[in-house]
Image (cartoon, rainbow, N blue to C red):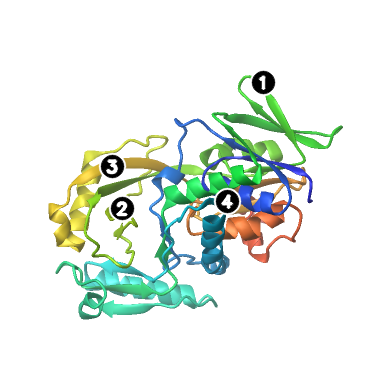
């Protein structure tokens, strides 16, 4: 409720967007942002605001993502007005590109299956000649693809900076360099307590666990099941180039600064976020195959980051039944869903709105195997 204090554990794109939405809803906010050596998914984000191909067997996620993309321009403008930071949102549509007729056919089949679930995501299947009208630098290996008018991109680092800047301007208490090790609920004071390893603690009326991989452990403290596992993604970035790519693609995109971001891999390697030369080579070869002019571009950086994923890849949005006022929120789509987390999730966790209907499908207990009757 307005005037209450809320603690949010996790200062990445997810936690920061919820924190900003909470403070603009009238709550007092404390945001715990871990030290720089933490496994931060936000710094490994590819920067797509993307829907096509998402939501197979989960129509609720399609509708949830469409809503987030619809809200994005409002968040872009609001952050620009408050902070002066342009997060470089562009929503011209986006392309998925295939190297064989079989890949393109499989893509079309998947998109049809998604829309057959009773949702509607606009898409167009294109052959090579169609694609060249929009992407004239395409290499001869690209035979076709799909286009969705809802897709776009943003600068994830500028988005994170803008959210933190807006929080400071609005008076949030951002505590940096603190790792919350456990949380408890005090029945006498009816408040939540967040503890670090040294035993220091902070109190709040409400609590949001948005700690990425840390939620796997912390969620149990509020009696929510959150089986989150890490998946490493590697990304490359080139020197700044003359603009040639006006649309984001699933294989690479040109940032607002001119560099080409190339991604990404998906590896089950535990908590290893290092880069591997074979994966760097794979990404580089695929990028040059897609756009041959990149063969002359210099790579300036490569990095790996760990994405927090549930077993089915979809998010968890859940309030604790045992400890009302405590929430677990986890999602690997920090850019795509940033506006939804700010304008929809935040009022919900603030006690101002009812639980969105889609969230029934996003409870963590969907992963609990129950005995057959």
Nearer-N-terminus badge (1/4): 4
User: Is residue 178 or residue 116 the one in the foreground?
Assistant: 178
Q: Residues within 10 Å of mark 2 (few under 14, many from 20)?
A: many
User: Is residue 167 or residue 11 the one in the foreground?
Assistant: 167
Residue that carries the numbered disc 1 in the rendered image:
199
For numbered disc 2, what is the local secondary structure?
strand
For numbered disc 4, what is the local secondary structure?
helix
Q: CA distance from mark 2 to mark 3?
A: 10 Å
Front: mark 1 or 4 = 4
198 versus 300 height, above or below:
above
User: Is residue 169 or residue 256 the one in the foreground?
Assistant: 169
Nearer-N-terminus badge (3/1): 1
Do the residues under discs 4 and 3 have CB atoms within 8 angstroms?
A: no
Residue that carries the numbered disc 3 in the rendered image:
302
Visible residue check, residue 368 = no
Residue at 33%, 35% in the rendered image: 274
Q: CA distance from mark 4 to mark 3?
A: 26 Å
Residue that carries the numbered disc 2 in the rendered image:
263
Q: CA distance from mark 3 to mark 1?
A: 37 Å
Do the residues under discs 1 and 4 have CB atoms within 8 angstroms?
A: no
User: Position of 29 compared to 337: left or right?
Assistant: right
The image's mark for residue 96 is: none
Residue that carries the numbered disc 4 in the rendered image:
17
Residue at 37%, 37% in the rendered image: 273
Nearer-N-terminus badge (2/3): 2
For numbered disc 1, what is the local secondary structure?
loop
């Amino acid at each position: 409720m307005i005037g209450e204090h809320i603690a949010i554990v996790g200062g990445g794109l997810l936690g920061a967007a919820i924190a900003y939405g909470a403070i603009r809803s009238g709550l007092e906010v404390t945001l715990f942002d871990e030290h720089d050596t933490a496994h931060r998914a936000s710094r490994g984000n590819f920067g797509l605001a993307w829907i096509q191909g998402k939501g197979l067997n989960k129509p609720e996620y399609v509708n949830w993502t469409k809503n987030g993309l619809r809200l994005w321009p409002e968040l872009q403008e609001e952050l620009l007005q408050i902070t002066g930071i342009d997060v470089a949102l562009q929503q011209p549509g986006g392309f998925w590109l295939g190297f064989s007729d079989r890949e393109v056919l499989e893509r079309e089949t998947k998109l049809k299956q998604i829309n057959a679930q009773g949702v509607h995501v606009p898409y167009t299947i294109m052959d090579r000649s169609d694609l060249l009208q929009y992407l004239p630098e395409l290499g001869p290996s690209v035979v076709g693809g799909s286009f969705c008018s809802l897709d776009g991109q943003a600068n994830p680092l500028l988005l994170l900076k803008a959210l933190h800047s807006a929080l400071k301007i609005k008076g949030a208490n951002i505590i940096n360099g603190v790792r919350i090790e456990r949380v408890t609920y005090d029945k006498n004071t009816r408040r939540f307590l967040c503890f670090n390893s040294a035993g220091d603690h902070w109190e709040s009326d409400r609590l949001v666990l948005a700690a990425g991989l840390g939620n796997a452990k912390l969620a149990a403290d509020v009696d929510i099941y959150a089986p989150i596992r890490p998946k490493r993604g590697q990304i490359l970035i080139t020197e700044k180039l003359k603009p040639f790519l006006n649309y984001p693609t699933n294989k690479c995109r040109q940032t607002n600064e001119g560099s080409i971001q190339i991604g990404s891999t998906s590896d089950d390697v535990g908590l290893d976020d290092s880069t591997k030369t074979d994966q760097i080579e794979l990404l580089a070869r695929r990028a040059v195959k897609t756009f041959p002019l990149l063969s002359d571009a210099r790579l300036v950086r490569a990095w790996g980051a760990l994405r927090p994923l549930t077993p089915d890849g979809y998010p968890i949005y859940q309030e604790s039944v045992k400890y009302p006022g405590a929430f677990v929120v986890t999602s690997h789509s920090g850019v795509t869903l940033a506006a939804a987390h700010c304008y929809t999730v935040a009022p919900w966790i603030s006690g101002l709105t009812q639980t969105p209907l889609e969230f029934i499908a996003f409870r963590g207990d969907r992963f609990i195997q129950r005995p057959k009757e």
